[in-house]
Amino acid sequence: MTAKNIYQKLIAVRKTVPYLQKDQQGHNFNYVGSSQVLGALREKMDEQGLVLFPHIISSKVTPTAVQSQDKYGNPKVTTTYFTELEMEFEWVDAESGESKKVPFYAQGMDIGGEKGVGKALTYAEKYFLLKQFNIPTDQDDPDAFNNRIDHILPKVASDEQIAELNGYAGEISHLRGVAMEGVYSAIGVQNVNKMPADWYLPVRNNLIDMLKKARRKAEPQATQRQQQSLPVNEQGDQQVSEQKPQETQPMPVQKRQETPQPSSPQVTFESFTLKRIEHGQTPQKAAFAKLFVVPFHSNAEQIVFANTAETLEQIKELQEGSQVSLQVRQENGFSFLVAVGEAVYAS
């Protein structure tokens, strides 16, 4: 698997935190604390190998005298210090050394004067991370927020569903000699990557029907090519068997099946190094897990899906970074977990 660049890693971090609730109490308002923001993101930043460096480009401190009275009515003058910072945050990928700089502005108010820079830096870190990763902080509770967003934004097909559809469309494209865009356009799909989730099953059924027809149409052409490749004798005739069937005994005709019979899924059993496990849910709320593994015979990272109650229970005992034996089934271009441990696998 190709290594992620810094932008792909930032997207992976953004997917970690869809919402933060304002649970800190201020003067007549609620707010999200700096530690809450950093705590929600830091684990994923560490996992992706991302380091954030704050740089102060320039600073400005403006003192302001404010006149007031103490509780005895005596005049009092208080000086406040308004600190402004021109900053630059720099993301660095610890694995590749790739970096990305983002300009930012921060401010902080203090009475004593010595905490102005610290307050400005805290303010900058919190709001930079909130805006960098587009984290909403409405006062709704997380469930209410997610329900409201579900009504605003339509759900799109998952990466796994799109990959399956592309597999069907790719074979149709090859058999018919047309571009994949033309295959999708024929069934009314302009952009499969942004296709609504409820289109998945109708589009899948249409592609399967198109694939069956394309395979049937390709069969006579394949037979003709085989006949053209027969050896030729000195008279220029194609050589055939010397024993010809008698005219009174016609050759039996084998009836062709309209629907090709799918072959049994291939099942293998291999040893892997387990890198990490990510859990998720399908649009139908079915639980699944993605195991990121590296086989012993290769350095290429692979993804194995656990999508049954039995396999989800088995992977609870697995430790990230350990060596594991997995029974894997290959189907429709994806790898599915069958069992964990030393098991006899099907041929």
Image (spheres, rainbow, N blue to C red):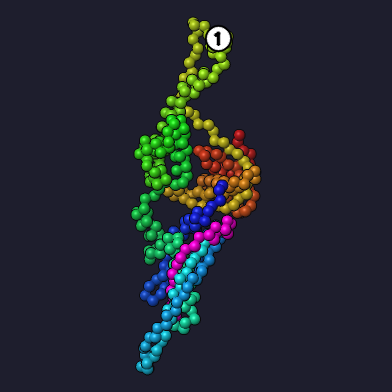
Which image quadrant: the C terminus? Answer: top right
Q: Is residue 337 magenta?
A: no
Residue 272 percent coordinates (x, y): 62, 47
Label 1 CA crowd tier, 10 Å (few <14, some 14–19, many 20+): few
Query: In terms of depth relative to the viewer, which is nearer, 228 or 324?
Result: 228
User: Is any atom of residue 341 visible in this view?
Assistant: no
User: Is any atom of residue 330 visible in this view?
Assistant: yes
Q: Which residues are magenta?
A: 92-110
| Location of residue 81 by image quarter | bottom left
Instruction: Name the residue beneath numbered marker 1.
Output: 235
* Residue at the image point whose x is 49% and y is 29% from the top: 261
Circle 1 sits in a helix, a strand or a loop, which is it? loop
* Residue at the image point whose x is 65% and y is 45% from the top: 296
Q: Main secondary structure of the magenta part?
A: strand
| Location of residue 208 by image quarter | top left
Amino acid under label 1? Answer: Gln
Residue 227 percent coordinates (x, y): 52, 18
